[in-house]
Amino acid sequence: MEPKLQRRVQRYGWNKAAAHYEGFWSAQLRPAQDLMLKMAELKPGERVLDVACGTGLVTLRAAEAVGPGGFVAASDISEDMVQAVADAAAARGIAGDFRRMDAETLEFPDDEFDAVLCGLGLMYVAVPPNALREMRRVLKPGRRAAAVVWGARKNCGWAEIFPIVEARTASDVCPMFFSLGTGSTLADSFRDAGFSEVREERISVPIVFPTAEAAIGAAFVGGPVALAYARFDDPVRESAHAEYLASIEPYRRDRSYHVPGEFVAVVGLS
């Protein structure tokens, strides 16, 4: 997909998903966020940027880690996501800089932050190397960037959502989604962007959905296919639901689904 079109698809798609994302995914993504934050080693008083912040699940935890003497900024390509994190921060009395912007063109000065985070966002960036170079640019020399992505496709039991949706639309929903999590691709991308002392960790965890309705909601309305799904009529939606549930049937335990998942996290110094 042409990068300009990909950026537009991601912007409008995540606007569609914004109201549903946290309800369907906050618990399921916690292990990935735990791993990235552990590797980032945030300290009180630091200035932190959360790129592709979503509804602020990482942003708010970063604010807690750096404390009142620190500072958090957050950006996302979706204005609805940015509004969600701004509202959540305000409700907690957290002052910060929350703005819609493309990860490939961060609107911050050079050498501005002590740490830059990107939790499960790089997979959606049209040209990920551009985002990594921007993350390094806004870091102070010798400071840390950390990112986490989904792992290899074969290790993510929910992966059939993409061909299921793509079979009902005219274009790729999320091209190259699993590429960064395959092999050492993410770590190599950090090195190519100029980061040093790059370190990678990979974890396998079950992605648990308590009911079929929760599994369907997470897959279709709370994630990257939300824009395409919004165009489906009722019969198409029903057939897509049935096909998706069949794809994760091997992981069903009574009413719940324990779907295999894999995450890869990387940290490097600017």
Image (spheres, helix red, strand yellow):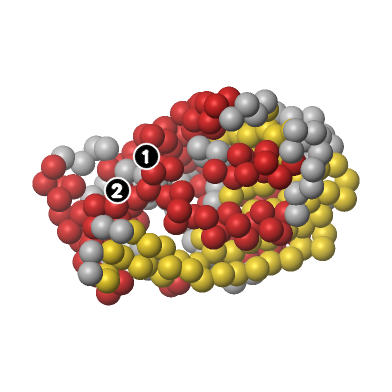
Can you tell which quarter of the image residue 261 is in? Answer: bottom left
Kind of residue indicated by mark 1? His
Can you tell which quarter of the image residue 63 is in? Answer: top right
Disc with the residue nearer the chain's start (2 vs 1): 1
Q: How far from the left and from the top, in percent, is residue 210?
A: 30, 59
Q: Secondary structure at mark 2?
A: helix
Number of labelled discs? 2
The structure residue drawn at horizontal position 42% and vertical position 36%, both measured from the top left corner, is 18
Mark 1 surroundings within 10 Å by alpha-carbon count, few (fewer than 14), some (14 through 19), many (20 or more): some
The structure residue drawn at horizontal position 23% and vertical position 69%, both measured from the top left corner, is 254
Can you tell which quarter of the image residue 181 is in? Answer: bottom right
- Report which residue position mark 2 lands on: 217
Q: How far from the left and from the top, in percent, is residue 66?
A: 75, 41
Lateral position of residue 47 relative to residue 26, left or right: right
Label 2 – label 1 distance at C-alpha = 8 Å
Q: How far from the left and from the top, in percent, is residue 257?
A: 31, 65
Res 250 seen here: yes
Res 170 seen here: no
Q: How far from the left and from the top, in percent, is residue 107?
A: 70, 28
Above or below residue 222? Residue 153 is below
Residue closer to the observer: 107 or 22: 22
The structure residue drawn at horizontal position 16% and vertical position 40%, both measured from the top left corner, is 233
Kind of residue indicated by mark 2? Gly
Q: Secondary structure at mark 1?
A: helix
Contact between labelled residues 1 and 2, with CB atoms less than 8 Å apart: yes
The structure residue drawn at horizontal position 35% and vertical position 68%, both measured from the top left corner, is 258
Above or below residue 158? Residue 141 is above
Lateral position of residue 247 relative to residue 42, left or right: left
- Report which residue position mark 1 lands on: 20
Mark 2 surroundings within 10 Å by alpha-carbon count, few (fewer than 14), some (14 through 19), many (20 or more): many
